[in-house]
Image: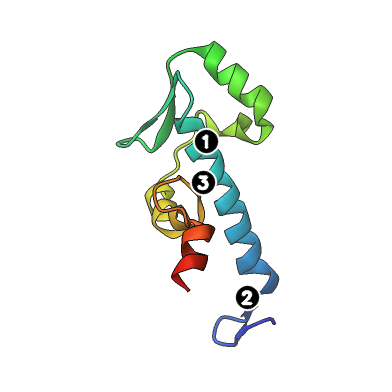
Amino acid sequence: MARNFPHCNIKAEPHITSKLHVWKKQYSTFTSMMLKSGLGWDESRHMVTVEDDTAWDDYVKRDPTAKGMRHKSWPFFNAWKEIFEKDRANGDKGADPFKDANDI
């Protein structure tokens, strides 16, 4: 269902949904990168840090979408974290379907 925003003459679909999809994918790539040895995050510059070019090359081979992310500032990363973090499974608060079924 498309929502219209008459005051700014834009439809939510597909524009906003498309942006959210791209941002979520980029956020997912960043969070995966942070788990790899030799890659990190510079909070003050909002950039990916690379300790070893080999680590970067290996990561880009596994995830080609990361190729253009190395020398670019990502000032919205923390906002993306607040928006998208709850959508990623990390094992901390995973549901146990068997426990949930027994509770019912």
Question: Which amino acid type corresponds to the residue marked 2 in the rendered image?
Answer: Ala
Up-down relation of residue 83 to residue 3 (above or below): above
* Quadrant in the picture for residue 82: bottom left
* Quadrant in the picture for residue 14: bottom right
Distance from the alpha carbon under mark 1 to that under mark 3: 9 Å
In this view, the mark in front (1 or 3): 1
Disc ID at residue 6? none
In this view, the mark in front (1 or 2): 1
* Quadrant in the picture for residue 86: bottom left
In this view, the mark in front (2 or 3): 3
At x 56% / y 52%, what residue is drawn? Answer: 24
At x 56% / y 81%, what residue is drawn? Answer: 8
Distance from the alpha carbon under mark 1 to that under mark 2: 29 Å
What residue is pinned by disc 1? Answer: 32
The number of numbered discs placed on residues in the rendered structure image is 3
Helix, strand or loop at disc 3? Answer: helix
What residue is pinned by disc 3? Answer: 27
**Among all residues in the image, which is located at the extreme left?**
44
Distance from the alpha carbon under mark 2 to that under mark 3: 21 Å
What residue is pinned by disc 2? Answer: 12
Nearer-N-terminus badge (1/3)? 3
Q: Quadrant of the N terminus?
A: bottom right
Q: Is residue 14 left or right of residue 42?
A: right
Nearer-N-terminus badge (2/3)? 2
Question: Which amino acid type corresponds to the residue marked 3 in the rendered image?
Answer: Tyr
- 72 or 102: nearer the viewer: 102
Residue 11 is situated, as x and y percent measured from the top left of the image, at: 65, 78
Q: Residues within 10 Å of mark 2 (few under 14, many from 20)?
A: some
At x 56% / y 39%, what residue is drawn? Answer: 29
- 36 or 1: nearer the viewer: 36
